Amino acid sequence: MNAHMHRFLTLTLLLGLASSCTMVRDFLIPPARNAYAGMNRVKQRPADLILGRVEVPGVGLRSLAIRGSTLVAVGMPTEMTALMGSRTSRVDMNGLWVSPGLRDAHVHLEGAALVQSAPALFNAKTPQALSELFESHLGLVPVRGWLWGFGLQKRLTKSLSAESLETMMPGVPLWLSAADGHSAVLSATLVDRLPPKLRKQVNALHGRVSEQLARRAWFTLAPPAGERLKPYVVKVLKRWRRLGITSVDVMGARMELYDTLRELEVAGRLTLEVRLYLAWPSPKVQRWLQAQAHKPLRLRSPKLSPSSRRHKVTIVGVKTWLDGTLGSHTAALSKAYSDRPQELKPLVGAARLSAIRSFTDRLSLQLAVHAIGDAAVDAVIGLKPGAAGRPIRVEHVQVARPDQLPQLQHVLCSIQPRHRLEDSPWARERLGVERMSWAYRGASLAKTCPLLFGSDAPVSTSDPRQIIDAAVKRPSPERLTRAQALTAMQRDPLNAKFSPRLHIGSTANLTFWNVDPKKNDSAKPMASMVHGILSINRSKSAK
Ligand SMILES: [Zn+2]
């Protein structure tokens, strides 16, 4: 499939479809205007792949035609004959139900890849168990010279320090990430590798860093990228693909990850569409973005014309943090925590936030803002909707006061339905009864703010079925319908007018199910297509 094939979306095909359009109109969106270019080339452009017997919800059994990475037709089998060429492949989908591809709107790909290479600390209940775990990993996973573990239990985080880790394992550079993914304990040997100013700050906390400091230290110590990370990235993406996911939004990515992913894409090893929101303010990212300021096209926004080649990996935005987490008492709340007299202002002031926003607007990037507490949400609301820019994504929105809801209609709310379950052991204690009723919203948030669903992997499970279940199997009034939840797992944050249908002329990212996913709890992804490449799950269970 060569690049200029995309240039000619075939009109005959679209005209052919028009006959059946009365029936499928509800499901098909006309192609973008420029897709009509090259209409006279129609007959010379056969499809690369025709999928037979696909159940299109509300329409019936149809065939789908794919050319390159584009969905070019949905119609009756007879309408496909015009698209058959000598090199056109055919696959019988055996009545599987199709939906737009599932997206995970919030993942940490590097973290998820590193998790594959590091010991899981979830089950270590004592320092002794910890040291045994690391003992067995010594020499196995040198993360550019240091060892990393994840999933440290909360209780252990409190009892460990740089000094105690040093006593446990003298001379070993250790980084232990807490189970919430947002705080860590560093051993004295590792702290010594930090630049002087940062080292002083981390030492003052006895190596127990949360949020901002952890992030700065992480970027300074530079976890592995490139060749070392590659096999793990490949593995993780494959796993997500098997779950029916076709596209992921990576939050707080480093430039190194972009390079790694580009290499994988060129080598044909990238199985998912990956979109990056670069970490701001990582100094390296800032420098790079500044350098791009006058050549925004190099950012390869996915808003490509049909004539362009579609990249699977693109930099689409910037992620910045306004606060930390509820678990570590670092989320910015407008009133003190119920279990601790602590107030925290948003980490970024209004002026700075709006400067970042103008910057992203100028580069046609989307701004993703981490805001968990209501005070952080206030800061996002304070930003006026931009004229030309993309809508701002608010990540997490875990505490939103009733008066904030109507003001969220200009942003996208990126939430992780599983967090409500995972935080339940302590959330009420932190927030108190009244505030708890504003926390972890579902239906009330969806009324004003278009939802995006994500996993926050590796902090939480990536399985879309579990994410959807968490949203639809909760008590009313915050329960969402299956259709709402499914849409939140398909919505494209870059497309303000998103509707959960098959769009002729769009990138062929599709998920195939055993039953209608909008109606059945038992719906399970059986196959998926990413940029026109089909992958069928080899599952034991019959569909
Ligand atoms: Zn996250």
Image (cartoon, rainbow, N blue to C red):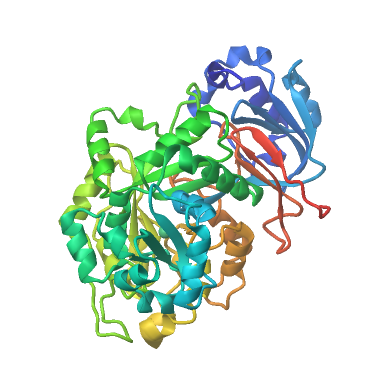
The residue at the far front in this view is: 170
Q: Residue 99, relative to residue 476: is it above or below?
A: above
Q: Judge whether 12 appears above or below 132 on screen.
A: above
Along the viewing direction, whichever of 275 and 187 lies nearer the viewer: 187
Can you tell me which quadrant of the image ligand 1 is in? bottom left
Observer-nearest of 210 and 369: 210
Toward the viewer: 298 or 73?
298
Percent x, y of residue 121: 50, 67
- Specify whether 227 is left or right of 184: right
Residue 203 falls in image quadrant: bottom left
Q: Is residue 13 left or right of residue 35?
A: right
Total residue callouts: 0
Residue 33, position in %: x, y? 49, 27
Q: Is residue 246 visible?
A: no
Q: Residue at x 51, y 58 (%)?
A: 137
User: Residue 427 at x, y = what percent?
Assistant: 43, 80
Q: Residue at x 25, y 58 (%)?
A: 192
Which residue is depicted at the point 75% across and 20% down? Answer: 84
The vertical placement of 361 against 79, above or below, is below
Front-most of 166 and 277? 166
How far across and down, in percent of the image, does residue 516 sit?
Answer: 73, 54
Would residue 62 be seen by someone viewing this image from the given angle? Answer: yes
Answer left or right for 445 relative to 374. Answer: right
Q: 41 above or below 58?
A: above
Q: Is residue 116 left or right of residue 281?
A: right
In which quadrant is the N terminus drawn?
top right
